[in-house]
Amino acid sequence: MKNKLWTREELLLAVNLYHKIPFGQFHQRNPSVIELASLMGRTPSAVAMKLVNFASLDPYHQNRGVVGLGNTSKADREIWYEVTNNWERFVDESEAYLEQLRQDQGIAQTSVDAIEDELSIPVGPTQVEQTVKVRRGQRFFRDTILASYQNRCCICGIPIRELLVASHIIPWSDNESLRLNPTNGLCLCALHDKGYDRGLLTISTEYKVVLSTKLEQYLPDDAVMNGFIIYDRLEIELPERFPPDKELLSLHNAHYFEA
């Protein structure tokens, strides 16, 4: 019996999940894979195989020699190209599909579960629609960044999800085209996120922590030593995929960091 062709909507949902779970979890026993398979009426093994095929299209995994299962289709390649060339449209569309499927099956939608950027949302007749779109983007960006960094702060390594933030290298409000691009993200704990946002620390293009001299006025305070100073010039833990864009890091250093 011939396998049922994947629809565009199903492919978008599979790519959406691909970005939200680590590579090592692309298997049929993963609860997230099982849930998506159930929502789409497919088998967990079919969804898992599709995720591995998408990995073969990911430049990061290509460099690691991941070749997929040899079943990557033209449709797979087309949807991958579409996604990586228009993050905002992909995120809004795929998250809307996911919300609808969960709603149809009576499954509650998860919410963003951590500190997020302060957002400027327009007022007027489009407010509700804009708010929904923003929340979808927040949810996807957070899930993608945390998965890429194995749910750990890239500076201190703390693994408590409730204390982790999907930080933007270039702030949300300053460049709309970068808002949902995972290479514009860092996984930071709440303390280091706030320090990064306020220009008290930055990440160099060599992926090392650089601290502002403003912190020196608080020394020899133990809390400042343990929270910041001990990490000066140390390399961050790089993500499994979507390494921080060096050009964006350079822009943060030049325009947001208080040396």
Image: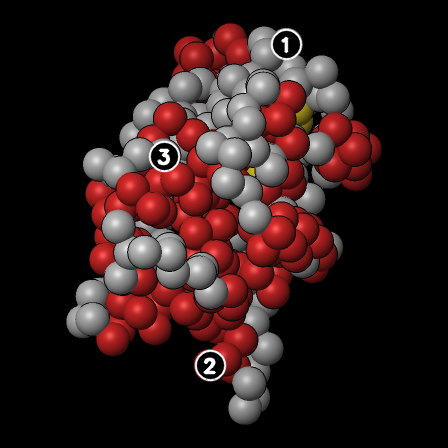
Picture colour scheme? secondary structure
Q: Amino acid at mark 2?
A: Val
Assess disc 1: are there few (<14), some (14-19) or many (≥20) residues with their C-alpha within 10 Å of its C-alpha.
Answer: some
Q: Is residue 167 visible?
A: no
Assess disc 2: are there few (<14), some (14-19) or many (≥20) residues with their C-alpha within 10 Å of its C-alpha.
Answer: few
Image location of residue 83, percent across then percent down: 61, 54
Q: Amino acid at mark 1?
A: Arg
Image location of residue 219, percent across then percent down: 54, 12
Q: Amino acid at mark 3?
A: Phe
Secondary structure beneath disc 3? loop
- State whether residue 156 is above or below residue 106: above
Q: CA distance from mark 3 to mark 2?
A: 35 Å
From the image, tell me which residue sits under label 2: 128
Direction bottom: furthest residue? 125
The answer to which image quadrant residue 27 occupies is: top left
Left or right placement of residue 25 versus residue 60 in this view = left
From the image, tell me which residue sits under label 1: 233
- State whether residue 86 is above or below residue 156: below
- State whether residue 118 is above or below residue 144: below
Q: CA distance from mark 1 to mark 2?
A: 44 Å
Image location of residue 33, percent across then percent down: 29, 45
Quadrant location, the N terminus = bottom left
Reading the chain from its start, which is encountered first: label 1 or label 2? 2
Secondary structure beneath disc 2? helix
Q: CA distance from mark 1 to mark 3?
A: 35 Å
Left or right placement of residue 129 versus residue 48 in this view = right
Q: Which mark is residue 58?
A: none
